[in-house]
Image (cartoon, rainbow, N blue to C red):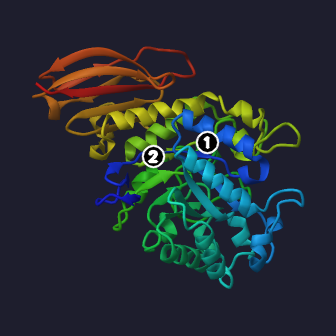
Amino acid sequence: MYNLSVNGRFLYNDDKPFFLLGDTAWLILYKLDLKETERYLRNRKSLGFNYVQIVLVYSAGNMHDINEMDHQRINPNDNTLWDKAIDFMELALKYDIIVGLLPCWGAVVKEGFVNEGNALEYATFLAKKFKKYQNLIWVLGGDVRGDVSFETFNILGSTLKKLTNNLITFHPFGRTGSYLWFNDCPWSDFNMFQSGHRRYDQLNLNLWDDTSLNEDTFGEDSYKYVIKNNSYLIKKPVIDAEPSYEGVVQGLHDPKEPYWEARHIRRYAYWSVFEGAFGFVYGNNAIIQFYNYESKGSYGVRESWYEGLTSPGGAEMQYLLELMNEYDYTKGISNPAIIKNNKSFHHRTAVLQSNEYILIYTYLGDKLIVDLSDYKDKRLDIYVMNPENNAKAYYDTIEGVNEYTFRPTRRREISNDWVIIFKVVQI
């Protein structure tokens, strides 16, 4: 049974900390058959992913009258949507994967097809349909602001909380967090934010999805969403549920722009997790839409979903999971001030530290001046980790040192991020 920590920062599986490592497979019920679905899940399990988020009703074209949802078909020759969803849940159980299940995409609420009048009936139907599955987290929203129909989402959340034992959260619009609308709602167990797909210089593109209100938007600084979440009086765990997707055009819309690559995804992940997020949800452009070359893809997609299964960024996420499980992240706090020469933007260095360790992530491989005054009476073993391949090497042992300067080795010009580990030696 998945539950929340007492301090409101983490998830637990019974009495053990649970680091959620997620993948995004929004359209899998619409695009893959059962054999292909098992291929996908088996691949994700082999890479350490323990959570996959998908959507049930993706658009108004997929939604008939709510009383007929048991009979809804994706197409006349296919199983019902609900049969496919149950098959997916069973396969996820087989591979011990949690499913983040969206009742409907945000636009379906925004356009009024799920509304205050039918939300109670829909949520009751969903609770009955999926009542046996403990490997399920209800994810409301779907790339939408919570205030487009606050009461609709509130009815969905309150009803599912009353009728099920599953955790519930909300997937928000780009560059916002669910804490903006639902942090004090009893049905909301943890917060999601979407750091999104834009560079620092793309925050105002005058497009349909600009965030025009006066709330905080932080662009590539994913860790700032964690700080914002933690500023609320009611404390809830938080996770980046949609960072920049690997293989997506930067800014999302213009195919002439460069692409987000594995090195960028690592930065989003380590920045948010070292700030205190309880996990990370990865996404790959080919996999979110299960592109297969047979139709026009979106967001500049360049490869098929089965090629995306071996993308470097997706494979590298397991090293973050292994690191967090090796060093008890629930004891850590963010303390970037320990880096005396810390800077901003891409030069920012992230730090997660406890009495037992200091974990440091530098994206550009800058020289680091580390304040060790709180550890001067301890012996520290230093290790260096390459987050591209999980190679770890012993580097040095120090004792009685107030300050330590570290100059990372340069791997290459465009990818030079490192994790430096200071481990307290028990004497």
Quadrant in the picture for residue 85: bottom right
Report the mark closest to the observer, 1 or 2. 2
Judging by the rendered image, the residue that carries numbered circle 2 is 279
Which amino acid lies under the numbered mark 2 shown in the image of this protein? Answer: Gly
Q: Which residue is pictured at 51% across the width and 24% down the height?
A: 388
How far is mark 1 from mark 2, CA to CA? 22 Å
Label 1 is placed on what type of residue? Arg
Residue 342, x across and y down, in percent:
36, 34
Residue located beneath label 1 in the image: 199
Q: Nearer the viewer, residue 38 or 120?
A: 38
20 relative to 111, above or below: above
- Give how far across and how far down residue 242 sits, in percent: 58, 49
Q: Position of residue 206 (x, y in %)?
A: 72, 55
Q: Nearer the viewer, residue 98 or 170?
A: 98
- What residue is shown at x 44% (from left), y 38% (from top)? 344
State how many labels appear.
2
Q: Is residue 162 above or below residue 357?
A: below
Query: Where 207 falls versus 300 (above or below)?
Result: below
Q: Residue at x 16, y 26 (%)?
A: 402
Q: Quadrant of the N terminus?
A: bottom left
Q: Which mark is residue 51?
A: none
Instruction: Name the image quarter holding residue 69.
Output: bottom right
Q: Earlier in the sequence, mark 1 or mark 2?
A: 1
200 relative to 307 in the view: left or right: left
- Local crowd at mark 1 within 10 Å, few (<14), some, or many (≥20)? some
Q: Is residue 250 visible?
A: no
Along the viewing direction, whichever of 210 and 47 lies nearer the viewer: 47
Q: Secondary structure at mark 1?
A: loop
Relative horizontal placement of residue 378, taking residue 390 as reference (left or right): left
> Which image quarter holds the C terminus?
top left
Q: Give the structural element (helix, strand or loop) at label 2.
A: strand
Residue at (53, 30) in percent of width and height:
316
